[in-house]
Image (cartoon, rainbow, N blue to C red):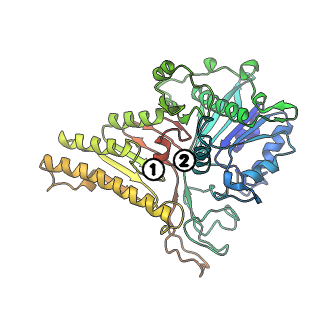
Amino acid sequence: MYTAIIQARRLIYIAGWSVFHTIRLVRDGAKEVPSLGDLLKMKSQEGVRVLLLVWDDPTSETIIGRTDGYMRTRDEETRRFFKHSPVQILLCPRSAGKRHSWVKQKETGTTYSHHQKTVIVDADAGGNRRKIIAFIGGLDLCGGRYDIPGHPLFRTLQTLHKEDYHNPNFAVVDARGPREPWHDLHSKIDGPAAYDVLKNFEERWLKASKRHGIKKFGKSYDEALLRIERIPDIINISDTLYFSDNDPEAWHVQVFRSIDSNSAKGFPKDPREATRKNLVCGKNVLIDMSIHTAYVNAIRAAQHFIYIENQYFIGANNLVPIEIALKIATKIKVNQRFSAYIVLPMWPEGKPTGHIAQRILYWQNKTMQMMYKIIYRALKEAGLDDVYEPQDYLVFFCLGNREASDSPSASSTADSPQVRMMSCFPFKSEHIVLVIPKRLDKAYASGRDALHVI
């Protein structure tokens, strides 16, 4: 991603729940690398169009002044950093739409957020042409996200993770650690699907700029978007290369959204057209829930196994858990082996004994009970309840790590820090991969903000 940003010549568009200008994308120690904020300023001064679309945390600006906010996204700090530069930033709140009451507006603005995490740049396409590439997944460009596959707890505290780690689950009062590792997924898209990610950003930017209704440098925010069809050296989506199915580096990619018409432009006005596009009609809003349909179809098509990584797993308002359980029950009925592997954090982010964490754990437990009951009933009906256990078909795992410390912190009360599981990575048989930014349950609820790739 760092290399892609460095090599951009026309545009750099970033959308995120949070963006920290202080982070460094490369930390190999071999050379001094500028912070993300300085890098974006440098590129904007080179003439690259740099746009940032960041969630506006309503708790970071109160009647008593600006604060860090409950979620500590540092959105106001990011805005101030880019204030007198060519970089244009929009802080975008969640909106319930104009026709809802003041109470509903406040509820939506404070309860929900924008969770898309994308970076879109132009890249070399050969022959003095440029193309669009995109990075999408579960990683925000903010503090505490940088990690390596080994998920170290102590040995990188003075190097890779110096002053940059996030310990929401237990208190560490000094720099000796341990740090809580971060596990997540991100992907790079090169090809026609990258233009879909660009289109999504443009639609969100236009919606957000209309809401602001203010001008910067004499130009309105909605004029900030480049019209790439008017830039001769950027190839059009119809001219992008398609790779052979025999190419081991090629994947079929399709982008889905979980978003509503209050967060993006381009939704049809005609209800009949909305129905043809499989959009869901809510109260004064149209909702794109195509990712839920994609999930259900992928589960139903699976033949041997399903693998899921997620931050939460609650089946109260989506069909995914019951679809998995019914898939297993169907396989038991025809005497075929099938397994589902689900990886979750031991408890949600925050104090495990807190009210919110306990409620989430309660409903996750209810979801698991529901699934195991369906599987056990299928085993009993097939006369296999003395041969197999429901856990032979459905298992839940938690990630964890241990590491010896040369100078363990006497103040730490955590015996075995867990790895922070934030990714949403379902993997089903026959090689279909879905990469989703966190929060499976919330991404499926009506109108929640997320962008997904399959």
Residue 20 in view here: yes
Give the position of the N terminus as an image quadrant.
top right
In this figure, which residue is indicated by the disc labeled 2? Answer: 185
Instruction: Check disc 1 and report its element: helix, strand or loop.
Output: strand
Q: As rendered, which of 448 and 142 lies closer to the eye?
A: 448
| Residue 270 tag number | none
Q: Measure the C-alpha gap from mark 2 to mark 1.
A: 10 Å
Label pair 2/1, CB-CB below 8 angstroms = yes
- In the image, residue 280 sits, relative to residue 117, either above or below, namely above
Question: In percent of the image, x 73 and y 59: which residue is there?
Answer: 67
Instruction: Check disc 2 and report its element: helix, strand or loop.
Output: loop
- In the image, residue 299 sits, relative to residue 69, either above or below, namely above
What amino acid type is highlighted by mark number 1? Answer: Glu
What amino acid type is highlighted by mark number 2? Answer: Leu
Q: Where is residue 199, by image quadrant? A: top right
Question: In percent of the image, x 23 and y 40: which residue is there?
Answer: 330
- Image location of residue 333, percent across then percent down: 18, 41
Question: In percent of the image, x 34 and y 48: which residue is there?
Answer: 340
Q: As rendered, which of 357 and 310 lies closer to the eye?
A: 357
- Image location of residue 361, percent across then percent down: 42, 60
- Image location of residue 342, percent across then percent down: 39, 51
First in residue order: circle 2 vs circle 1:
2
